[in-house]
Image (cartoon, rainbow, N blue to C red):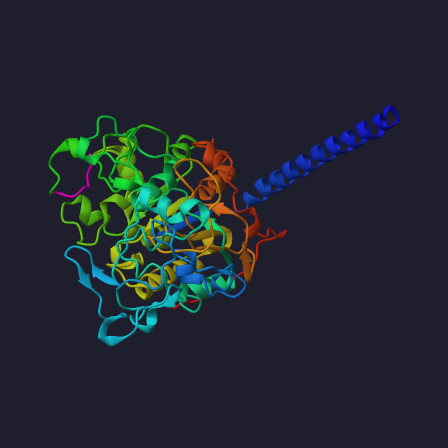
């Protein structure tokens, strides 16, 4: 027995030294990535709306898509569903969408993914689906991904998809990088994930009205605006403008937030940045477009960007100003672009094709300018919009991650014709920005996120690329 001790100790020593070597290699790799990132002078994030990865790119060549999927959906008792319910065009008032089976004597759709364009072209709108904080957790069902139909208000639409491979953004994905294991960081909807994108944290709402507090018990679920411990997780509006004019009771508006945002981190280091929103000028002037989404403006919730503040004027601007800044050569180092409702691809009020064409227009405009040579463009989606996806999200914390969403990375420094299977999430964007500009993380999640390093290929000199039109 004693004769084996030296060998055991030697093996443990080798294992220890191997671990040190692996850690050192990882540190060296990240250090090189950080050095290479200095070649990038503009990070542009285009934030679209409400599609799962399988919902758009489940047919994308080489991606972890529908060919790998199990389709089983069950009810609350765990019994398999045999067919999908009738697709709903509107929930309130209830109105069936008779473009879909079982209308007109057609058999009900089976429980399986189906191409929505068999019934509704990509340039027309469908109904919407519920996408809320507790609902998505119940749909994910501990990673089984089998209760999307049961916990939806439009279960017939949950498993529908549009093959976007040959649409304008899909063509960009074919040319550059598509990430097929990118998850939206927060369970539920747009409001929450916009907050995560800029702050890696939910807003706090102490003393929120009692009728806005959730009851997360599935037996009598009330998936409202605020958790029982006073974090805002579902759609709510800021006490700052712009917010819906019909809300005049200030107690029903989210109070000023003071936790740090990525904008604060950038400003404190004197790094230029802007959030460009479609329809912003009209909204702050008091006549918002009917499809302007107030809860898609996350910086509005923060005291530093309150009405009349210098920071608001400097950093929160209209999407039209993006094109003006691009033309003048004054585009900031970090850019967020939030298109107006008709251009954001959100099911229910926007059609997919118009949103894809709008994004392609933005990309082409950037590629036509000199800044293209040192720019990375990230096209991603805030959340899955209640649509099913077959890949279980990784373990995280009480806030997420949620389901997979499409993410496309476009740059002279991006790999070409590449499907990146690495696990990322929304706060990976924060991590990329933080590494590039030497910023402190905002929370644990972005501190430990993967900065999407595998999507890049940094040669010794910039890759020369010419503008292309993707329509």
Quadrant (top left/top right/bottom left/bottom right) for the C terminus:
bottom left
Q: Is residue 206 above or below residue 466?
A: above
Q: Position of residue 11 (x, y in %)?
A: 79, 32
Vertical arrangement, residue 22 with respect to residue 327, above or below: above
- Can residue 41 be seen from the camera position used here? no
Q: Quadrant of residue 221?
A: top left
Q: Is residue 263 above or below residue 392?
A: above
Q: Nearer the viewer, residue 111 or 342?
A: 111
Extreme residue in the top direction = 2
Question: Does residue 242 show up magenta in the picture?
Answer: yes
Q: Position of residue 301 (x, y in %)?
A: 27, 35
Of the pair 216 and 31, the residue shown nearer to us: 216
Q: Residue at x 51, y 57 (%)?
A: 177
Tell me where the magenta segment starts and ends, as one range: 239-245
Question: Is residue 96 found left or right of 453 in the rendered image?
Answer: left
The quadrant in which the N terminus is found is top right
Going by the image, does 157 lie left or right of 19? left
Image spot of residue 257 (x, y percent)? 29, 30
Q: Is residue 61 magenta?
A: no
């Amino acid at each position: 027995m004693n004769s084996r001790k030296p060998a055991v100790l030697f093996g443990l020593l080798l294992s220890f030294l191997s671990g040190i070597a692996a850690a050192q290699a990882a540190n060296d790799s990240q250090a090189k990535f950080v050095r290479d990132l200095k070649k990038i002078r503009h990070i542009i994030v285009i934030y679209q709306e409400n599609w799962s990865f399988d919902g758009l790119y489940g047919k994308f060549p080489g991606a972890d898509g529908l060919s790998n999927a199990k389709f089983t959906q069950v009810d609350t008792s765990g019994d398999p569903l045999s067919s999908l319910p009738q697709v709903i065009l509107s929930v309130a008032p209830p109105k069936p969408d008779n473009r879909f089976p079982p209308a007109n004597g057609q058999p009900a759709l089976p429980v399986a993914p189906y191409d929505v364009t068999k019934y509704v072209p990509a340039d027309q709108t469908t109904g919407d689906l519920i996408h809320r904080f507790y609902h998505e957790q119940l749909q994910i069902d501990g990673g089984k991904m089998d209760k999307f139909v049961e916990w939806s208000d439009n279960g017939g639409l949950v498993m529908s998809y549009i093959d976007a491979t040959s649409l304008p953004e899909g063509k960009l994905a074919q040319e550059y990088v598509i990430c097929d294991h990118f998850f939206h960081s927060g369970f539920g909807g747009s409001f929450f994930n916009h907050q995560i994108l800029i702050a890696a944290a939910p807003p706090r709402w102490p003393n929120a009205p009692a009728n806005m507090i959730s009851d997360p018990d599935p037996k009598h679920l009330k998936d409202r605006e605020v958790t029982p411990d006073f974090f805002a997780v579902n759609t709510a509006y800021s006490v700052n403008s712009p917010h819906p004019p019909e809300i005049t009771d200030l107690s029903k508006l989210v109070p000023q937030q003071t936790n740090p945002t990525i904008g604060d981190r950038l400003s404190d280091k004197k790094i230029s940045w802007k959030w460009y929103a479609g329809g912003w000028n009209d909204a702050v002037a008091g006549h918002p477009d009917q499809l302007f989404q107030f809860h898609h403006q996350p910086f509005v919730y923060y005291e530093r960007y309150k009405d009349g503040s210098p920071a608001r004027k400097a950093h929160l601007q209209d999407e039209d100003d993006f094109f003006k800044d691009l033309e003048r050569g004054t585009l900031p180092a970090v850019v967020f672009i939030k298109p107006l409702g008709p251009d954001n691809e959100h099911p229910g009020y926007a059609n997919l094709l118009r949103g894809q064409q709008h994004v392609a227009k933005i990309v082409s405009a950037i590629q036509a300018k000199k800044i293209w040579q040192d720019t990375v463009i990230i096209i991603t989606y805030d959340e899955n919009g209640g649509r099913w996806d077959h890949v279980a999200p990784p373990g995280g914390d009480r806030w997420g991650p949620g389901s997979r969403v499409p993410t496309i990375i476009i740059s002279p420094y991006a790999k070409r014709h590449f499907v990146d299977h690495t696990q990322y999430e929304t706060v990976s964007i924060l991590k990329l920005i933080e590494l590039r500009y030497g910023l402190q993380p905002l929370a644990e999640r972005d501190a430990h996120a993967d900065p999407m390093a595998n999507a890049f290929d940094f040669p010794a000199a910039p890759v020369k690329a010419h503008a292309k039109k993707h329509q």
